[in-house]
């Protein structure tokens, strides 16, 4: 019996042990990092075991992974991630109940490039401190498409019909290719011309300048820039595109309407040979396509002010009014034509960009751009002027032909003398020229009837040569982290303009000079210097001491000659002429504590003191003018990279601003007879405080992405306007009779805040994506209105506080099935509500403006055929009945076929603005006026074009 129990106990124990062993499972935990100790999110981890387990998971935001209920204790992990070398590791798990931790596993960066591989489930977005990186291959487009087509698909990024790019609600102001400026940072030159199939990734960067990029210390307000990285296997070869097209307007047959010829000619060539890169861009067309953005040189205003009504624009900028453009534009599918550009432009452009590495230490990159554009505009402006006692209206028409010629050259030379020394020198030169002729008619009415009517004619010319030089030197001492940097800037901006203004009264009398010749010479020379020293306080901490000096000297000479009609000769008018010189000087001292743990934390905390002075003198002033200010303010920057899929940021900066010479010049400008303007030499410099915060997160499992940011701005001594309404009879100065005179004041109380959110939900391997975005802006502005009594000439001035709230939500659904369809349906709704402390019928009438825009755009593919469409419909609400708001339908479409070997050739037949409703319409509201402007745009036309593309990379020709 004893042996029986002993034997039974033995077998029972063996059975229990076997049962326990058979039923045991394990939990396996671990994490992945790269060589910089950063977690690798979204990596693929596959587990197999001796018991038949086959489990797959992707790593989380911290690079972590966990497998549960693993049956076998002999396991194999296969690890892979895009950009890293694959790895296989084997483990034997202990026979206990504790979770098995395989530890932290290191993946090495991929060093060899493979041929073209389609990777399903690759991570499309990576966060890197101040950078959001989008993998271009994750956003499919057809062969030969420009990179702009990819950028349109990126969450949080928007491209309007004119090609302007915004990211997280802020304008992208500069573009780089492989980390270097491309055509001086001109955004559209890259986005509309670089082929998408040679691009590896697109980065959206908060840039703090060259010095910050070297030292890592980030202060001030960043700018949004874009960096386009070319695929490593595309850095040896070339790609080129030639497009020619011809067509005609298809406008209704009406008196005075001509159907003109439409044409386009384009040649782009990109050559890559390792570090040597060359790009040539050229374009000739009359379809409103601009290769480069040169901006508008400062010069003489339009004679009748119908396009840029100076007085209303100033009110808008300083008193919180809002500009709402309701001219229709398509959804942005047509990347080669601009539906939203005012006027009709003949364009001739050429540009060359070059980059090379000369030896191991010296590199060069630079560009030259040229444009010769002639634009014809036909506009009508209706303005309702609100005063404290009465209201008037002004109706202005304007025809203008303007020719703008621009040259731009810049070069960048970088020299790494040794590991410790770095030099950069950037010389630049630009030249702008403008010749324009305009004619128009103006009528002004009050409750009592017609107050003024006249025709205006102008002829003007302008030249503006500008020079600049930037230099940077950085030295790293022997002690790790000890660093000193110096930067120097020199600049000279010159503008020489001439105007001949002719005003002819058609009703009543015109009190302003009827025939003026105005010559203006303006020159601003500037110099800046900066010194920065870093002292390490530990492994990651630094103390920064910085000094910055800035000085600008402006000489503004204005000479007005008025026609003596009795003798038919021009004589100088000293009342309208002046020589005004001023200087603006700032000295900034700051000390900061900086902490930077690469790939994790980067923050700066400090304090700055900035004295500033503004000195001016003029023969019209009894004595020189001197104003000064002293500002003490904190500085802060914080960036926390939680993982490659989550970042948090905060930034605070302060900056001083000087008034421009138009705001300071103490002489009346009668370029617009109805809206004269005079500067105030006693203006003080303004000071602006900026704060912003952002939170971005990307789910590596679902690929959902959330981008958010908020900002707040307040300005001390904001330069604002005082609009003075003069009666029909004003004997102290008859020139001001029946005019709306603008001058400038400093005011406190200005602030604004804004918020942005973008949330994208993709599914089915990003074949379908739902995107929501919203922008909210609120501003609190100060302006002034003054009325002159028609009997006593007593002035009555009232402060106007304009509070404006605008809300712009949008919803977009995208379908992206390669070689089948690439399309989207989009809805945007905007609300702009303005409350003014000065109440009148006009401000109340435009206090709640709404607009609904619905659009559908896309491309359907049928083997070698493509059908493209772009339709939008805009509904406008809330406008006063006197405003002729339209609800335009805009439809563009084309059919194209690709042919020849490797689809080198494309033939396209296109129709633009099929309903012929592409007229620009905008409304501007301000405390003292509501302005409605209609302006011509390129109407309905058709175009037949042929495109030939050729690529050769690494011995492969396409």
Image (cartoon, grey):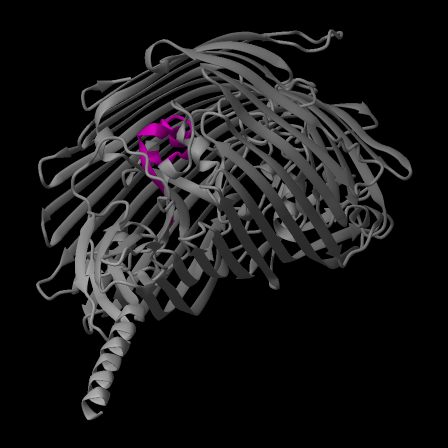
571 vs 21, left or right, is: right
Write down the quadrant of residue 183 in the picture: top left
Q: Nearer the viewer, residue 477 or 225?
A: 225
Figure quadrant of the C terminus: top left
Instruction: Look at the picture and state if 939 lies above or below 446.
Output: above
Looking at the image, residue 597 sits to the left or right of residue 382; the answer is left
| Position above or below: 770 against 343 | below
The answer to whether one can see residue 734 in this image is no
Q: Position of residue 730 (x, y in %)?
A: 79, 43
Residue 435 in view (yes/no):
yes
Q: Is residue 231 magenta?
A: no
**Span colored in magenta:** 184-205
Q: Eyeballing the image, is 368 above or below 36?
A: above
Give me the residue at 29% from left, 21% from top. 239
**Farthest residue toward the bottom?**
2
Counting from the top left corner in percent of width and height, residue 508 is at 84, 27
The quadrant holding residue 887 is: top right
Residue 233 lies left or right of residue 463; in this view the side is left
Residue drawn where x is 24% and y is 52% of the image:
79
Is residue 192 highlighted in magenta? Answer: yes
Which of 243 and 82 lies nearest the eye of the viewer?
A: 82
Q: Position of residue 284 (x, y in %)?
A: 44, 14
Residue found farthest to the right: 448
Image x and y of residue 901, in percent: 33, 11
Q: Is residue 836 above or below residue 99?
A: above
Q: Residue at x 31, y 65 (%)?
A: 601
Q: Along the horizontal axis of the image, is 820 left or right of 855?
A: left
Q: Quadrant of the N terminus?
A: bottom left
Residue projecting furthest to the front: 1
Residue at image position (79%, 41%) is: 879
């Amino acid at each position: 019996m004893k042996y029986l129990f002993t034997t039974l106990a033995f077998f029972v124990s063996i059975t229990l042990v076997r049962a326990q062993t058979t039923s045991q499972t394990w939990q396996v935990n671990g994490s992945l990092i790269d060589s910089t100790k950063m977690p690798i999110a979204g990596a693929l981890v596959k587990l197999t075991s001796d018991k038949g387990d086959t489990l797959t998971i992707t790593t989380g935001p911290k690079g972590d992974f966990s497998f549960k209920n693993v049956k076998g204790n002999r396991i194999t992990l296969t690890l892979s991630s895009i950009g890293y070398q694959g790895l296989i590791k084997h483990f034997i798990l202990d026979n206990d109940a504790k979770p098995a931790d395989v530890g932290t596993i290191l993946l090495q960066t991929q060093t060899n490039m493979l041929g073209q591989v389609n990777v399903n489930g690759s991570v499309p977005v990576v966060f890197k401190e101040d950078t959001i990186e989008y993998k271009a291959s994750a956003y499919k487009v057809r062969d030969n498409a420009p990179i702009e087509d990819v950028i349109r698909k990126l969450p949080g990024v928007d491209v309007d019909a004119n090609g302007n790019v915004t990211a997280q609600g802020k304008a992208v102001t500069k573009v780089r290719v492989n980390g270097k400026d491309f055509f001086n940072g001109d955004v559209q030159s890259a986005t509309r011309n670089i082929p998408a199939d040679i691009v590896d990734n697109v980065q959206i960067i908060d840039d703090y300048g060259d010095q910050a990029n070297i030292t890592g210390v980030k202060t001030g307000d960043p700018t949004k820039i874009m960096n386009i990285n070319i695929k490593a296997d595309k850095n040896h070869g070339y790609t080129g595109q030639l497009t020619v097209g011809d067509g005609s307007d298809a406008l209704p047959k009406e008196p005075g309407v001509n159907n003109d010829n439409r044409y386009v000619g384009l040649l782009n060539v990109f050559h890559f040979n390792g570090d040597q890169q060359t790009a040539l861009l050229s374009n000739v067309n009359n379809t409103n396509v601009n290769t480069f953005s040169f901006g508008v040189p400062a010069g003489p205003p339009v004679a009748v002010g119908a396009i840029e009504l100076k007085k209303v624009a100033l009110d808008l900028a300083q008193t919180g009014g809002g500009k709402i453009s309701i001219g229709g534009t398509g959804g942005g599918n047509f990347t080669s034509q601009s539906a939203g550009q005012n006027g009709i432009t003949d364009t001739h452009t050429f540009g060359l960009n070059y980059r090379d590495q000369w030896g191991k230490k010296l590199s060069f990159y630079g560009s030259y751009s040229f444009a010769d554009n002639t634009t014809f505009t036909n506009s009508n402006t209706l303005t309702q002027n609100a005063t404290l006692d009465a209201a008037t209206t002004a109706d202005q028409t304007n025809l203008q032909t303007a020719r703008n010629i621009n040259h731009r050259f810049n070069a960048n030379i970088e020299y790494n003398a040794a590991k410790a020394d770095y030099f950069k020198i950037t010389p630049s030169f630009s030249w702008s020229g403008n010749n324009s002729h305009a004619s128009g008619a103006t009528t002004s009415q009050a409750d009592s009837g017609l107050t003024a009517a006249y025709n205006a004619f102008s002829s003007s010319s302008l030249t503006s040569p500008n020079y600049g030089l930037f230099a940077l030197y950085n030295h790293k001492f022997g002690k790790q982290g000890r660093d000193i940097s110096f930067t120097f800037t020199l600049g000279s901006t010159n503008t020489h303009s001439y105007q001949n203004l002719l005003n002819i009264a058609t009703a009543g009398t015109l009190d302003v000079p009827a025939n003026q010749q105005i010559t203006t010479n303006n020159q601003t020379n500037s110099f800046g210097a900066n010194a920065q020293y870093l002292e390490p306080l530990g492994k990651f901490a630094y103390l920064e001491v910085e000094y910055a000096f800035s000085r600008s000297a402006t000489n503004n000479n204005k000479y007005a000659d008025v026609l003596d009609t009795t003798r038919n000769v021009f004589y100088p008018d000293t009342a309208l002429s002046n020589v005004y010189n001023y200087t603006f000087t700032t000295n900034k001292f700051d000390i900061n504590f900086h902490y930077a743990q690469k790939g994790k934390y980067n923050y700066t905390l400090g304090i700055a003191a900035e004295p500033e002075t503004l000195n001016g003198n003029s023969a019209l002033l009894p004595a020189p003018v001197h104003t000064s200010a002293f500002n003490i303010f904190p500085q802060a920057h914080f960036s926390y990279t939680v993982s490659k899929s989550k970042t948090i940021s905060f930034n605070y900066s302060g900056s001083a601003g000087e008034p421009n010479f138009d705001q300071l010049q103490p002489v009346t400008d009668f370029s617009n007879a109805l809206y004269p303007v005079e500067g105030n030499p006693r203006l003080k410099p303004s000071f602006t405080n900026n704060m912003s915060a952002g939170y971005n997160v990307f789910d590596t499992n679902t690929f959902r992405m959330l981008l958010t940011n908020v900002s707040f701005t307040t300005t001390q001594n904001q330069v604002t306007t005082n609009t003075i309404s003069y009666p029909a009879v004003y004997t102290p100065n008859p020139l001001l009779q029946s005019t709306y005179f603008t001058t400038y004041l400093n005011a406190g109380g200005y602030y604004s805040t804004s918020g942005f959110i973008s949330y994208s939900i993709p599914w089915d391997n990003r074949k379908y994506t739902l995107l929501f975005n919203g922008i909210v802006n609120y501003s609190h502005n100060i302006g002034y209105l003054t009325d002159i009594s028609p009997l006593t000439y007593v002035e009555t001035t009232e402060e106007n506080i304009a509070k404006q709230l605008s809300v712009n939500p949008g919803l977009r659904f995208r379908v992206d099935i390669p070689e089948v369809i690439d399309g989207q349906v989009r809805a945007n709704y905007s609300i702009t509500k303005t409350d003014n402390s000065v109440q009148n019928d006009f401000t109340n009438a435009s206090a709640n403006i709404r607009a609904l825009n619905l659009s559908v755009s896309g491309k359907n593919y049928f083997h070698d055929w493509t059908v493209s469409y772009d339709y939008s419909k805009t509904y406008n609400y809330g406008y006063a009945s006197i405003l002729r708001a339209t609800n335009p339908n805009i439809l563009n479409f084309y059919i194209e076929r690709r042919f020849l070997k490797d689809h080198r050739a494309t033939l396209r037949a296109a129709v633009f603005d099929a309903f012929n409703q592409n007229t620009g319409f905008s409304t501007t509201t301000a405390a003292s006026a509501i302005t409605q402007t209609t302006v011509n745009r390129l109407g309905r036309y058709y175009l037949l074009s042929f495109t030939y593309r050729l690529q050769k990379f690494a011995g492969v020709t396409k």
